[in-house]
C-alpha cells in the first residue's frame, strides 16, 4: 500500500503493523510529513484542545550508578561533576514553581541510591503536604517493587521510566550491566501499582533502524502509557558514543507525530533536547502532536552539571525567566499554557 493510504489508515484506526510503519518511515516525503503533523495536531486537539501542560523539573542529583552508553551522567564519566540537592533545596525549588503557578513537579536524577527509600518518602510527603493540589512525578530510574509501592503510598502519582529500546539486542548494546527484563517488569509494576507511567525512547541512536523504531512505537501502543517522552539522541563527548551522529529534530518530529496517532490520548513533552538542537525545536514538537513542556526549576548553580548531553538550553535562566519564555513560546505556536496538574485524559481532573 502506498504511504499516503497507510497514513490515512493510521489516522482512522490508530494502528498499523511493524512492516507498515517501516514503509511509512522509509517513504516519508515533505508533503506527507506536513499531512502527518496536521493529523497529529488534530488528534491531540480532539482530547486536550490547545492546552499545553507545564511540569516544573527539579534535577536533584547527578550521581548515577548506571553506565548507559549514551549518557553524560553514566558512572564511567569521571569528568562529570556530581551534586546532590538537600531535601530543603528540593522543597524550595518546588515552592518557587508553585509561586509561578505550576501544579506538577518532576523530580529527576541519575540512579542515586544515596537517596534512600526513607529520604525519598520524606521528600514526597513534604511536597504533598505543602502543595496538596500539585502532582508529583518521579524520574529516578529502576528501584525495587517495595520502593515503588512505598513512594506511591507517600503520594507520588506518576513515574517516568523511558523504555529506551523495545528491541532486546539494541537495549542490551546500550546498557551494560542492566536487564531488559527488569526494565519492562518495572514499567508493568509501576502501572499495576496505580502510577500514571511514562515510557519513551531516543531517536538517532547508533544501530537503530526503522525496524527498531517501529518496534518502539508498537511497544508504546501495547503498553498504553499515560506519558510518552521521545527526544533526539545528542552525543556527549565524554561517553563511548561520542563519535556517533545522533538524532535530528526532523526525524524526531516524525516519531512524535506517529506516537500521537498510535496512542492518541498520551501526554507528550516537547523535550528540552529538541530545543537544544534547534531554537524552534520545542515549538515544532508542539505542532507535531506534543502537549507538555518541562521548564527547569533546578538551582542555577547545578544546571550545567546535570549534563545528560552537552549544550543543553536554559542553563542560565531562573524560574521566572523560564516561565515567561515558555509561555511566550506556547502562545506564539497558537496554544495556551495550562497550569493545572495536567492529568491524563482518563483520570479524574480533581486534585
Ligand atoms: N536516570 C533516570 C532519569 C534521568 S535520564 C533514567 O535513566 O530513567 C532521563 C532520560 O534522558 C533518559 O531516559 C534518556 O532517554 C535521556 N538521555 C540520556 N542521555 C541522553 C542523551 N545523550 N541525549 C538525549 N537524551 C538523553
Ligand atoms: Fe544514569 Fe539515567 Fe543517565 Fe542511564 S540515562 S546513566 S540511568 S542518568
Image: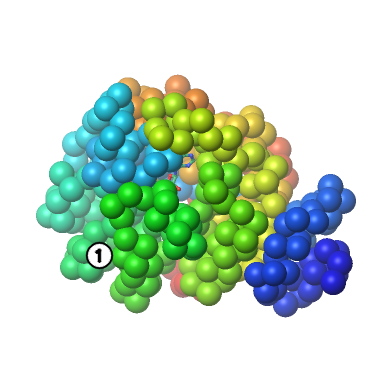
Q: Is mark 1 within 8 Å of ligand 1?
A: no
In the figure, is residue 258 to the left or right of 145?
A: right
In the figure, is residue 28 to the left or right of 271?
A: right
- Residue 259, image x, y percentages: 62, 61
Q: Mark 1 points at which residue?
A: 148
* In this view, 347 is above or below 151: below
Q: Give the crowd class for mark 1: few <14, some 14-19, many >=20 residues within 10 Å.
A: many
Indicate how the structure is coloured in the image. rainbow
In the figure, is residue 112 to the left or right of 247?
A: left
Evaluate whether residue 212 shows in this view: yes
Please tell me which residue is depicted at 25% across the width and 64% down the height of the picture.
Answer: 148
* In this view, 90 is above or below 146: above
Evaluate whether residue 269 shows in this view: no
| Number of marks drawn | 1
Quadrant the C terminus occupies: bottom left
Q: Which residue lies furthest to the left in this view?
A: 118
Q: Quadrant of residue 274?
A: top right
Please tell me which residue is depicted at 24% across the width and 44% down the height of the picture.
Answer: 65
- Residue 322, image x, y percentages: 50, 32
- Residue 21, image x, y percentages: 70, 65
**Viewer-closest of 223 and 270:** 223
* In this view, 346 is above or below 126: below
**Viewer-closest of 90 and 302:** 302
Please tell me which residue is depicted at 33% across the width and 49% down the height of the picture.
Answer: 176
**Viewer-closest of 242 and 32:** 242
Quadrant the N terminus occupies: bottom right
Please tell me which residue is depicted at 53% across the width and 45% down the height of the picture.
Answer: 205
Q: Quadrant of residue 38?
A: bottom right
**Viewer-closest of 135 and 65:** 65
Label 1's element? helix
- Residue 217, image x, y percentages: 59, 64
Amino acid at each position: 500500500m502506498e504511504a499516503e493510504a497507510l497514513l490515512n489508515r493510521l489516522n482512522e484506526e490508530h494502528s498499523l503493523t511493524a512492516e507498515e510503519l517501516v514503509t511509512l518511515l522509509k517513504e516519508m516525503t515533505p508533503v506527507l510529513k506536513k499531512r502527518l503533523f496536521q493529523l497529529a495536531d488534530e488528534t491531540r486537539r480532539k482530547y486536550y484542545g490547545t492546552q499545553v501542560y507545564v511540569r516544573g523539573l527539579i534535577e536533584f542529583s547527578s550521581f548515577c550508578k548506571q553506565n548507559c552508553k549514551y549518557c553524560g551522567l553514566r558512572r564511567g564519566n569521571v569528568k562529570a561533576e556530581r551534586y546532590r540537592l538537600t531535601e530543603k533545596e528540593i522543597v524550595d525549588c518546588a515552592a518557587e514553581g508553585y509561586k509561578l503557578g505550576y501544579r506538577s513537579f518532576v523530580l529527576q536524577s541519575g540512579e542515586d541510591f544515596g537517596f534512600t527509600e526513607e529520604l525519598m518518602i520524606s521528600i514526597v510527603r513534604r511536597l504533598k503536604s505543602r502543595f496538596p493540589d500539585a502532582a508529583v512525578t518521579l524520574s529516578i530510574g529502576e528501584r525495587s517493587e517495595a520502593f515503588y509501592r512505598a513512594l506511591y503510598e507517600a503520594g507520588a502519582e506518576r513515574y517516568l521510566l523511558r523504555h529506551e529500546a523495545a528491541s532486546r539486542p539494541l537495549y542490551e548494546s546500550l546498557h551494560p550491566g542492566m536487564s531488559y527484563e527488569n526494565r519492562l517488569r518495572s514499567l508493568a509494576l509501576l502501572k499495576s501499582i496505580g502510577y500514571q507511567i511514562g515510557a519513551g525512547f531516543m531517536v538517532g541512536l547508533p544501530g537503530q533502524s526503522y525496524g527498531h523504531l517501529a518496534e518502539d512505537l508498537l511497544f508504546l501502543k501495547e503498553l498504553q502509557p499515560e506519558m510518552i517522552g521521545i527526544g533526539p539522541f545528542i552525543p556527549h563527548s565524554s561517553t563511548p558514543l561520542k563519535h556517533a551522529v545522533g538524532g535530528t529534530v526532523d526525524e524526531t518530529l516524525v516519531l512524535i507525530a506517529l506516537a500521537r496517532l498510535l496512542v492518541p490520548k498520551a501526554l507528550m513533552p516537547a523535550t528540552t533536547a529538541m530545543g537544544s538542537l534547534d531554537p524552534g525545536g520545542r515549538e515544532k514538537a508542539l505542532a507535531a502532536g506534543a502537549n507538555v513542556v518541562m521548564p527547569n526549576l533546578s538551582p542555577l548553580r547545578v544546571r550545567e552539571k546535570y549534563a545528560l548531553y552537552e549544550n543543553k538550553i536554559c542553563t542560565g535562566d531562573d524560574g521566572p525567566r523560564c516561565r515567561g519564555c515558555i509561555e511566550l513560546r506556547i502562545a506564539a505556536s497558537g496554544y495556551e499554557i495550562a497550569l493545572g496538574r495536567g492529568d491524563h485524559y482518563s483520570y479524574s481532573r480533581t486534585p
